[in-house]
Image (cartoon, coloured by chain):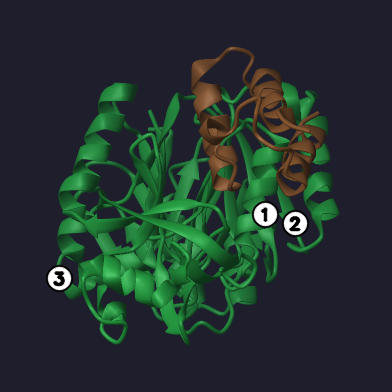
Chain colours: A green, B brown
Amino acid sequence: MHIQTAFSNKDSAEASVRELAEGLSAFDPKLVLFFASTKYIPANICQLMQNAFPGAEVFGCSTAGEIVSGQMLTNAIVAMAFSAEAIKDLSLQVVQDLHDEQHLTNAFKVFETHFKTPMADIDPTEHVGIILIDGLSGAEEGFIESIGDLTNVTFIGGSAGDDLKFAATHVYANGKSYQNAAILAMLKPGVDFTFIKTQSFRDLGIPLEVTKADEFSREVMEFNGQPAAASYAAAIGTTVDKAPEHFIQNPIGLVIDGEPYVRSPQQIKDSSILFYCSVMEGMELSLLESTDMLDDTKQSIDQAKEELGGISGIVNFNCILRTLDLTQKGQTQDYGKLFSAVPTIGFSTYGEQFLGHINQTATMLVFK
Amino acid sequence: MAGKIRQMIDLIIHQRAKNNPMLERVIKTKLMLKGVNPKKFDMESPDDPAILLKLERMMQMFK
């Protein structure tokens, strides 16, 4: 086994990290990835994790719920350890100011130096990037877009959470905790890998073209030349007052080759709608309707398994809105069981990244 | 002036994908997530400065 997982939900950070380290003690990891509840003091948990694995690169973030093989958890810490066979090479960078692009380009210069290759020539079939980013920064869209401009390597990841307190989220690397920051890990796995992007929605074919929006405040003022709230309500067939009741089951999406990139409405503000990610003027969006999350996720895992010929590890960045939906339906145990057979860790995110910043989606990095 | 957006889209796809169909799909998706739908532009499309700026930036950053 080149990839192993462990979890703990003990009350103290010290006891939890000790339990994790014991669970992974038969292993000499090159990389340890972890996701931790904010019940653990951020500055403490990252230091303890680095100290527990002194020979490894260690990074992670705070969460709004955790996932480990077979279970969805709360108030816990989960970790995945990778051997040198699983990860042949890696470079870890902390981008400390999400609003200053120079910090990002500097990180990519370090990647170029580390891999001794210009970014434009780094092979996206042999490399993959993981991004963990402050989930309350509101900066994810521009940041992931710039990453996509800089490289053909796919970066996948999630926005850190804070157990639904919406006060402060944290990313961790090298024993330190950061805010308004992102951790970027450029990996060269020693095993094949693929991606899952799964969202349980179908396109209803009802167009909502964004005719007036402020992408920086994630506000849409008009769809189809009409006030956004009224236009959305009309598309659903309900009133503006009742429209928020439909937000979870009927988000909207940019549908590309039949694949929705979900934009989730957050609230109605006057006649506008605020979203959980930015929506640009001119975008031709479509009203979506929810489908069965358990079936869709299982199918996606089965497809990845068939594509790779087996799975040795999954890192699951699962939207908090999906987790809340599963909780409401009493399906969290069933969702956890989808990952019983595979070493898996993940967390409930405040946003997901895959080519862009998206909502109500699970993005997963899958290793053979 | 017209057609410059179409030319730049084609150039970006050629520069970055190097005839790899998988990468072509990825780059078209990235363009759409920026609000630039490649299917909407042809050689008759007016040269919208805001879109040209996005495309110039995309070309400049991939070196």
Which one is in front, A275 or A292? A275
Q: Is residue A359 visible?
A: yes
- Residue appearing at x 21%, y 71% in the figure: A237
The percent coordinates of residue A299 (x first, y second) are 20, 39
The label nearer to you, 1 versus 3, is 1
**Marks 1/2: CA–CA distance:** 10 Å
Q: Secondary structure at mark 2?
A: strand
Q: Which residue is mark 2?
A: A95
- For residue B14, above or below residue A105: above
The percent coordinates of residue A114 (x first, y second) are 78, 32
Alpha-carbon neighbours of circle 2 within 10 Å: few (<14), some, or many (≥20)? many
* Kind of residue at badge 1: Phe
Q: Secondary structure at mark 1?
A: helix
* Kind of residue at badge 3: Lys
The answer to whether marks 3 and 2 sit on the same chain is: yes
The label nearer to you, 3 versus 2, is 3
Alpha-carbon neighbours of circle 1 within 10 Å: few (<14), some, or many (≥20)? many
Q: Secondary structure at mark 3?
A: loop
Alpha-carbon neighbours of circle 3 within 10 Å: few (<14), some, or many (≥20)? few
Quarter holding the N terminus of chain A is: top left
- For residue A330, above or below residue A294: below
The percent coordinates of residue A344 (x first, y second) are 34, 48
- For residue A225, above or below residue A40: above
**Marks 3/2: CA–CA distance:** 38 Å
Drawn side of residue A44 relative to residue A285, left or right: right
Pointer 3 chain: A
Q: Which residue is mark 1?
A: A143
- Residue appearing at x 59%, y 26% in the figure: A124
Q: Which residue is mark 3?
A: A329
Drawn side of residue A175 relative to residue A106, left or right: left
